[in-house]
Image (cartoon, helix red, strand yellow):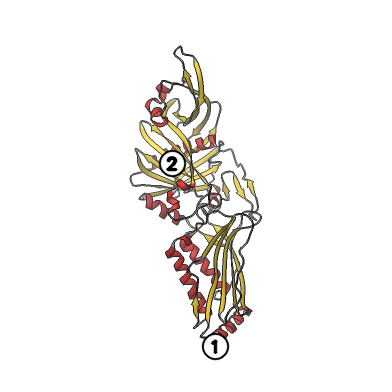
Amino acid sequence: MKNYIILIVLLHSCLIANSQTVRVVQLEQTLRWLSEYNFPNFLMVAEFENSIKDEIVIRLERFFPNADIISPDHISYRTITYFGKTKIKLPQPASEDFQVAIASSITRETVGYAVVWNMKVLVRQNKKVILEKEVEHELEPYSISIRFSNHPWMDQDEFKNIYILLLEECLGIREQNAIPIALGSPEIIRRNIAAAMPISRVYTLAVTGGMMEPSATRYRVLRDSLEIGSFFYRPTNLFIPNFSFNIKEIFANLFTQISGIETQYRLESKEHRTGIIYSPGGSDRKVRLDWLQENIISTDDVVIGSRIISPITGLYFEEESLISRFMFMKEIRKLEELTIHNLQFQMDEDVDESIYTIFGLFNAVEFSLVYREVEELIFIKVDNELQAILSLININPESQTFGRTKLTKNKTFLVPASKGSRKREVAVSAAEKYHLYTSDGVEDEDVLEMGHFLLLLFFAIGSVD
């Protein structure tokens, strides 16, 4: 109530001075100790910046009725990667005009992983401070996995709404509170995926365990609340397929096409990883990755040189029958090559993105999976047709884990998550949940096979990184 009384007095003084000019002398937005992947610089888009400025003027007109509001041409934007804070900077008063400073900052806390949005507003006439107010809200992404990914925490609309909310709290237009602000929703991700592929159905992949680690992991595939299948993966060193490794017989033209290495060289398995996928009521499947050594052979069949090569080859078995052969590649791209982002945002410098790919043949049908870390999406193609996209954003609010890691309640430390039961069942209520979006014509049995494809990718990533 006290704040509102002060506001009424201020408004009354402004009404008397109805010919006054209000100059916004500082209008600044800062990003501190955070990445522009997570908090893009939306202000780089001129139309959006102008819309924010228009909203600021409207709020200032409510605080200064009948006054002439003059604001800067642009909202100043800067990033702080080391030490430093946003400060109010007012010039020496040169007239009877009101001077307004608005300094806004999104920052990670000094200790821990909490993120807050702070805004300071100072109003001065001559040397007299008319208003000095600072407000702060903690920002909470809707998914724990967003904290540890390159996924944006908010979109343009949310940025504008929160900015104006803080401004109104500083000006006394809105009553101040200290509750955290929830950000984002699965609907934002759905809209982005719909722009890349028409969505027919949405499935849920429920996961317990280290999804991209070489460890025991449990999966269930759900359509709405109906379970259409489940499987359990564990790494093993006991599975040694009963065949002699011969690149000409197993990979033939596939290897040459992908790697560019002619098959007249002798290729030997230098190192391998193996795992088993158990399906209730079905046949067990086995997977093997091989790091290959290329031997250079002389005319008398003597090895005169060798080197480890990439990509890594993969074999996939049902019982003892080979049902798939594939290759796994990890590509590192510099930030400047990510044109989809540079079209809109100026990102941090010297940042790389890892892109993981497996592609090959499954029962004589071509398939490929591409995982882009920046988007946190996995694109699944069958017969060179995009049929599904998996979002690697955990949509279960009851799950506070990300792989085998969780954040403490005070958001200060990352700690190992409980390893849980060794049973092959998945407790869906506590599991990590990821949405799998499919195109028209994809049926439940197709989705189950895609689930196995995803395991192949996860197995490879967990074995390599």
Select label 1 or label 2 by which is in front.
1
61 and 428: which is toward the camera = 61
What residue is shown with label 1? 16
- Residue that badge 2 annotates: 370
Verify CB contact (< 8 Å) between mark 1 and mark 2.
no
Dot 1 falls on a residue whose secondary structure is helix
Residue visible at 43% across and 49% down?
Answer: 339
Count of marks overlaid on the render? 2
Q: Residue at x 51, y 86 (%)?
A: 18
On the image, the x and y values in percent for residue 271 come to: 53, 26
Provide residue 262's location: percent of width, then percent of height.
Answer: 40, 24
Q: Is residue 424 visible?
A: no
Rendered image quadrant of residue 93: bottom right
Mark 2 lies on a secondary structure that is: strand
Q: Earlier in the sequence, mark 1 or mark 2?
A: 1
Crowding at dot 1, Cα within 10 Å, few <14 / some 14-19 / many 20+, comes out as few
Q: CA distance from mark 1 to mark 2?
A: 65 Å
Quadrant the C terminus occupies = top right
| Quadrant assignment for the N terminus | bottom right
The vertical placement of 104 against 246, above or below, is: below
Q: Which of these two is toward me, 33 or 450?
A: 33
Residue type at numbered disc 1: Ile
In this view, the residue farthest toward the bottom is 16
Question: What is the crowding at mark 2: few (fewer than 14 residues within 10 Å), some, or many (at least 20)?
Answer: many
The image position of residue 50, as x and y in percent, is: 45, 67
